Amino acid sequence: MAPEQERSADLTSSVTALARKRGALIMAHSYQPAEIQDAADFVGDSLELCRAAASAPEEIIVLCGVRFMAETASVLAPRKLVIHPVPEAGCPLADSMTAADMRAMKAAFPAALPVVYVNSSMELKALSYACCTSANAVQAVESVPSGEVIFGPDRNLGVFVSRRTGKVVRVFPGGCPPHARADVSDLRTRIAEWPDAEVLVHPETPPEAWDLATAVLGTGGMIRHVGRSSATRFLIGTEGGFVHRLNKLFPDKQFLAVGRISCPNMKKITLESLSASLEDLEPVVTVEPTLARQALAAIERMVGIG
Ligand code: CIZ
């Protein structure tokens, strides 16, 4: 084993031993670096992380992802200690729509009920009827008891949802910078190189990428699609870290990340910062209790859908 690999393996063993000593559950988003996914007890998308955080017996959750994920887990599991190892790991998409933007849209479209992507601030969730993830955005919008919906912050996901529901969807023009700038020419090149491959792209990518795809899916949907498919090669148009999860789940199939989609915030947590968090049981995520109460109904709707 190369010295760097040996060091990483030692650190992973000490992180998992420390987690057991503390009675902590390490949860990682599917976009986290490979070594964080390998150290985690549970890896999943936002919806799976929320559900697991709420139902896990552990009192301490160390959430390796971006900040809104840890905040959402903390609202769903208010009696647990939720730790987010690197508080600066935020989400520009979540920051792209403010509460003032939402109030302005509500004033402009008074008959519309808001549905917000989970990649949003707690203030936005508190102003919304329901939250959703890419796994249940279509069902969440369909479940709203109005014919008109405000959708934010992700424009591409909003357009995707509006094409697949019978609702009038008022879409806020925000975006995930790495997904919105996906390199569609790279996608075309890889399709020419692997003509037999199925092409799976995320709905946060631009519609030109959807036009080249076999299916447009969130990461949970991609996993289910690969599990059912007889294809052996897949081009994956979402954050590159996800391919590690696919390789582990489906060792007999081949995956290639396409579109050069890389989220710098998802790469901020390291084995060292995870270890320090377990040692000190910090930094703890807190959400102001009144705000948490106001956001809970929208978050619970999300967890109950799909
Ligand atoms: O829902 C999530 O966790 C995100 C950010 C993407 C996906 O499709 O899993």
Image: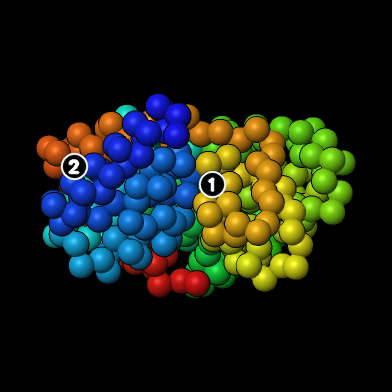
Q: Considering the numbered disc 1 on the image, is that residue within a helix, a strand or a loop? A: helix
Q: Residue at x 30, y 48 (%)?
A: 63
Residue 296, position in %: x, y? 29, 61
Asked whether mark 1 lies closer than 8 Å to ligand 1, one says: no
Residue type at mark 2? Leu
Distance CA(mark 1)–CA(mark 2): 24 Å
**Color style of the picture:** rainbow
Q: Name the residue located 63 percent from the left edge and 67 percent from the top edge.
A: 227
- Residue at image location 41% in from the left, 55% down from the top: 43
Q: The disc labelled 1 sits on which kind of residue?
A: His
The yes-or-no answer for disc 2 within 8 Å of ligand 1 is no
Residue beneath label 2, please? Answer: 278
Q: Of helix, strand and loop, which one carries label 2?
A: helix
Label 1 or label 2, whichever comes before in sequence order: 1
* Residue 277 seen by the camera: yes
Q: Position of residue 101 (x, y in %)?
A: 45, 39
Q: Position of residue 235 (x, y in %)?
A: 72, 48
Q: Is residue 221 above or below residue 8?
A: below
Q: In which quarter of the image is residue 165?
A: bottom right
Q: Name the residue under label 1.
A: 244
